[in-house]
């Protein structure tokens, strides 16, 4: 009679572990460190507010079986100017695995192109803060994707001023 109770116990532990893992993943992807008041978007965190531990954990999520988690980790790392994040994001984009995950909060349209464009612009500006050379290299890296995404965004006119220096 001990076997069923043991398997129930095991199941409970696994469920608890799974929930804890899910919470940790959500924390990694969405949290804003205590004391940060300048943004509520993790993509906009300054380098000094991003722990190396968080970066390392997010890099591990780049191989997660759930594409959405992989995509969110890639987006965040890319926005922070981390090359692995940029490469993973572009790989997902080129494989057609980025579509359909981000719906515009207010207008309800597919907002993936906007999300990716924003993150690529963050990547480039983060690199630019490191050095002019890094910024220029990033500009050339993101340029073809920025041009493609501009064709897909809901309101390309709004984006023109942000991408002027990249596509011209």
Image (cartoon, helix red, strand yellow):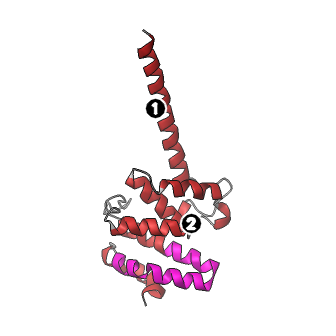
Residue picked out by circle 1: 15
Label 2: how many residues lie within 10 Å, few (<14), some (14-19) or many (20+)? some
Give whichever of discs 2 and 1 has the lower sequence position: 1
Taking the image as shown, residue 102 lies to the left or right of residue 56, namely left
Quarter that holds the C terminus: bottom left
Dividing the picture into quarters, in which one does residue 89 lie?
bottom left
Give the x, y percent position of residue 61: 49, 54
Give the x, y percent position of residue 38: 63, 64
**Magenta span: helix, strand or loop, mainly?**
helix
Taking the image as drawn, is residue 67 in sight? yes
Secondary structure type for disc 1? helix
Q: Which residue is drawn at 38% across and 55% down?
A: 67
Secondary structure type for disc 2? helix
- Closest to the observer, 119 or 140: 140
Give the x, y percent position of residue 34: 66, 53
- Closest to the observer, 163 or 40: 163
Per the rendering, the mark at residue 107 is none
Taking the image as shown, residue 38 lies to the left or right of residue 167, namely right
Taking the image as shown, residue 123 lies to the left or right of residue 89, namely right
Q: Is residue 138 magenta?
A: yes
Q: As displayed, is residue 120 above or below residue 38?
A: below
Magenta range? 121-150
Quarter that holds the N terminus: top left
Label 1: how many residues lie within 10 Å, few (<14), some (14-19) or many (20+)? few
Q: Nearer the viewer, mark 2 or mark 1?
A: 1
Taking the image as shown, residue 11 lies to the left or right of residue 39, namely left
Residue picked out by circle 2: 44
Q: Which residue is drawn at 42% across and 86% down?
A: 167
Q: Do the residues labelled 2 and 1 touch (CB within 8 Å)?
A: no
Give the x, y percent position of residue 146: 40, 78
Q: As displayed, is residue 150 above or below residue 108?
A: below
Q: Is residue 72 magenta?
A: no
């Amino acid at each position: 009679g001990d076997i069923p109770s043991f398997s129930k116990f095991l199941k409970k532990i696994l469920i608890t572990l799974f929930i804890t893992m899910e919470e940790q993943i959500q924390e990694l992807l969405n949290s804003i460190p205590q004391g940060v008041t300048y943004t509520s978007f993790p993509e906009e965190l300054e380098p000094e507010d991003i722990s190396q531990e968080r970066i390392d954990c997010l890099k591990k999520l780049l191989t997660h079986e759930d594409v959405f988690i992989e995509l969110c980790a890639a987006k965040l790392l890319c926005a922070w100017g981390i090359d692995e994040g940029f490469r993973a994001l572009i790989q997902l984009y080129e494989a057609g695995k980025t579509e359909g995950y981000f719906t515009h909060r207010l207008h309800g349209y597919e907002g993936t192109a906007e999300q990716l464009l924003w993150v690529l612009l963050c990547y480039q500006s983060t690199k630019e803060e490191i050095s002019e050379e890094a910024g220029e290299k990033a500009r050339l890296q993101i340029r073809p994707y920025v041009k493609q995404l501009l064709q897909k965004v809901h309101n390309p006119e709004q984006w023109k001023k942000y991408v002027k220096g990249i596509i011209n």
